[in-house]
Image: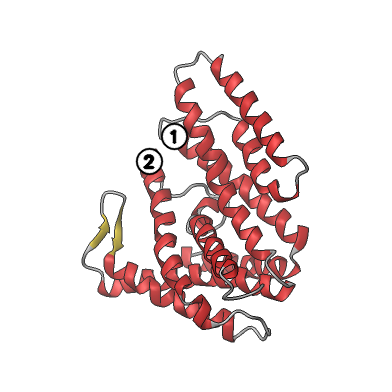
């Protein structure tokens, strides 16, 4: 079976599952995202260790769960302070050669993916069920559209390398093509989904710039880590697609950028969700 067939056979049911759980919202969606978050953290920790920067084996998960549950936890801030105090105390008495490295790498592994996924859950909770679903799906479709257009744009027109020391196959032409893919993804979300919401193309046009910029940055930071670790994929859990980090790398930075923008236009009175 070819790699392309594997990718398609996995991608179609996976996309259906993701869209279905996104529509259901609530803890169906949150539980699914938290589940994904733990797998991404596991892959990040493994990559960091292979790159010579090991993490603590337990606290990244603790930090990640705290972040992803922050909006619903009672005394969330105080719990976070307790986690911080306990982590620093334990690391202080770690006498291994990697103890100083673990201070920083454990925070990165604990914060990076969970913060992005928390923002995705916060986007889903904006406004009515229809509005939250539309905004979440728009972000995801823009990432997918940007990836597809960047890939084919780079293959067809790519000449100038974007970041040759990190990802030699990425080009500026592919990067620019990604913006067109983001527009297509946004248009599909706004016009192909028959919901009446306050979300309009005019209001959301700046998202094309945000998603088209931070999506590739998210992809590049993962490529940088994988290159240092000497691996092609973050894992082999997803047939034809590598690991969860490979599939969600762009969305981890896109979601915070989208959430900030949506909050700003709401705060300044341009829209009410």
The residue that appears at 76% across and 61% down in the rendered structure is 26
Check disc 2 and report the residue beneath it: 230
The mark found on residue 50 in the picture is 1
* Among numbered discs 2 and 1, the one appearing first in the sequence: 1
The colour scheme of the drawn protein is: secondary structure
Q: Residue at x 47, y 67 (%)?
A: 4
Relative vertical location of residue 94 with respect to residue 52 in this rendering, above or below: above
Residue 251 x %, y %: 52, 59
Q: Position of residue 134 (x, y in %)?
A: 64, 74
Residue displayed at 55% across by 42% down:
111
Q: Is residue 217 left or right of residue 172?
A: right
Contact between labelled residues 1 and 2, with CB atoms less than 8 Å apart: yes
Residue at the outermost front position: 268
Label 1: which secondary element: helix
Q: Which quadrant holds residue 214?
A: bottom left
Few, some or many residues within 10 Å of mark 2 (<14, 14–19, 20+): few
């Amino acid at each position: 079976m070819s790699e392309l067939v594997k990718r398609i056979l996995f991608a179609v049911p996976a996309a259906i599952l993701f869209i279905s759980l996104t529509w259901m919202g609530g803890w169906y969606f949150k539980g699914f995202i938290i589940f994904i978050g733990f797998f991404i953290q596991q892959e990040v920790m493994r990559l960091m260790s292979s790159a010579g920067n090991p993490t603590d084996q337990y606290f990244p998960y603790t930090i990640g769960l705290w972040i992803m549950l922050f909006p619903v936890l009672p005394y969330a801030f105080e719990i976070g302070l307790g986690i911080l105090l306990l982590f620093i105390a334990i690391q202080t008495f770690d006498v291994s050669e990697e103890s100083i490295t673990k201070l920083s790498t454990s925070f990165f592994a604990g914060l990076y993916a969970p913060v992005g996924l928390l923002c995705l859950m916060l986007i889903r909770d904006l406004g009515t069920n229809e509005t939250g679903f539309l905004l979440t799906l728009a972000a995801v479709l823009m990432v997918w559209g940007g990836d597809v257009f960047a890939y084919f744009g780079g293959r067809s027109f790519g000449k100038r390398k974007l970041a040759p020391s990190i990802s030699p196959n990425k080009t500026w032409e592919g990067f620019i093509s990604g913006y067109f893919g983001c527009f297509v993804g946004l248009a599909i979300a706004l016009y192909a989904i028959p919901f009446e919401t306050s979300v309009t193309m005019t209001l959301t046009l700046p998202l094309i710039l945000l998603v088209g910029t931070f999506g590739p940055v998210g992809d590049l930071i993962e490529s940088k880590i994988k290159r240092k670790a000497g691996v092609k994929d973050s894992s082999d859990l997803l047939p034809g697609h590598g690991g969860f980090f490979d599939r969600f790398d762009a969305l981890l930075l896109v979601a915070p950028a989208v959430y900030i923008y949506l909050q700003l236009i709401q705060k300044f009175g341009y829209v009410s969700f």
